[in-house]
Image (cartoon, helix red, strand yellow):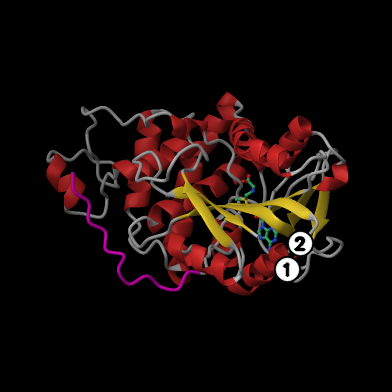
Amino acid sequence: MLIIISAAALPKINLNWVSCIYNYTSTEKRSELPSMSYKPRNFAGQATSNRRTAYSNNTNTFDPKMYTVVNKIFKFLENRDKTRICRVIGTITNWTGVTENTNLAAAMSSIYQIVKPVIDSQEIQKSEDRQDFITGKILDYIHPELVVSTEAKDWRLVDIGGGNGNILSGIQTRLAGPVDNYICVENQSGWQETYAYSNANIRYLFWDNQELSGLADGSVDVAFCMVSLHHMTDGTISNILAELSRVLKPGGKLLIKEHAATPDNLKYILWEHHMYHILDVTIGGSPGANQSAWREYLERSINNFKPADEWRSLMEQTGFKFGERLNRFLDGGFEPDPRNPSELYWDVYTR
Ligand SMILES: C[S@@+](CC[C@H](N)C(=O)[O-])C[C@H]1O[C@@H](n2cnc3c(N)ncnc32)[C@H](O)[C@@H]1O
């Protein structure tokens, strides 16, 4: 099935998102596509007789890549509901247009209506499986490096935009070392998910988007920016990279996890964020699920997605030396992967 969505002229994006990514484990599995006997329906819910027409000649198209994204986030839903969500998303053509976000807000509201009863009836909770999984992958990657490059176990690790710090906390549990050497850097201004900042085995540093106060020059072994840079303005990105260059030891590592944004995959990246936000709101009950709250989310959060080469240029301009580009699990090369429509990848740099 061929889906053509023109995204050539993308408006400047200053969208938003907030929700943290809870559970990637579903993406490890090949997504379960709806059965071929699925009967296409138009948005009004009427069955259509001609699949080709239903799928290719109107905006209500079924997009298997979008289904993969829906399945990643709402894996607990039945295929029928995941397909309904795809159809809601298929009605949105101007998915980058925050200025016309009434339709987007309405679509988010419709998706919420589909998801909420299931979350309520099945008492779905936030899952930390994904964070445990990625903690293991990070340890597999960095641990040999740290052991070889330093003698004492006084490694200092910094996680920029680490959220509640669960990943850093998991790393501290395995690597041990002083609590003060595991620093989760966050910023609570603007529109974003609220966290409990509840891990006692790490330190939280709330910075001002200017300086990493209290972190001495050349004092950090490894820094991570895991799907956090794209929630910062260009000015803040420039500040954090300059600060990371200052605080990392010569030879220290900077690991960034980002989306390799292109005009073609932007809708998957955006909807992945929107749907994580819906999940957050539905499970967490905050900051509300009415239309104006969806609009506020769309207007206030920052989604500063960039192509992979642009991220690399920014790092290199700051003086970081490119090491390697890896897949989203840090365990192999980054290649096109139908299970990864939002094209997440890691880049590793040396200070
Ligand atoms: C998608 S979450 C990622 C959380 C965590 N890194 C993970 O992978 O689970 C993005 C995080 O970036 C944080 N963030 C956004 N803007 C920030 C800023 N200016 N400084 C520090 N953190 C920021 C948010 O608070 C949020 O925790």
Q: Nearer the viewer, mark 2 or mark 1?
A: 2
Q: CA distance from mark 2 to mark 1?
A: 15 Å
First-in-chain label (2 vs 1)? 1
Depicted 157 relative to depicted 82: above or below: below
What's the residue at 87%, 62% (across, down)? 214
Please give the range of residues in magenta.
1-13
Q: Position of residue 350 (x, y in %)?
A: 61, 56
Task: Tell me the tag on residue 209.
Answer: 1
Observer-nearest of 318 and 98: 318
Ligand 1 shows up in the quarter that is bottom right
Task: Classify the position of the C terminus by image quarter.
Answer: bottom right
Q: Residue at x 47, y 64 (%)?
A: 306
Q: Residue at x 31, y 31 (%)?
A: 33
- The residue closer to the viewer here, 105 or 259, is 259
Any magenta on residue 11?
Answer: yes
Amino acid found under the numbered disc labelled 2: Val
Overall secondary structure of the magenta stretch?
loop
Residue at numbered disc 2:
247
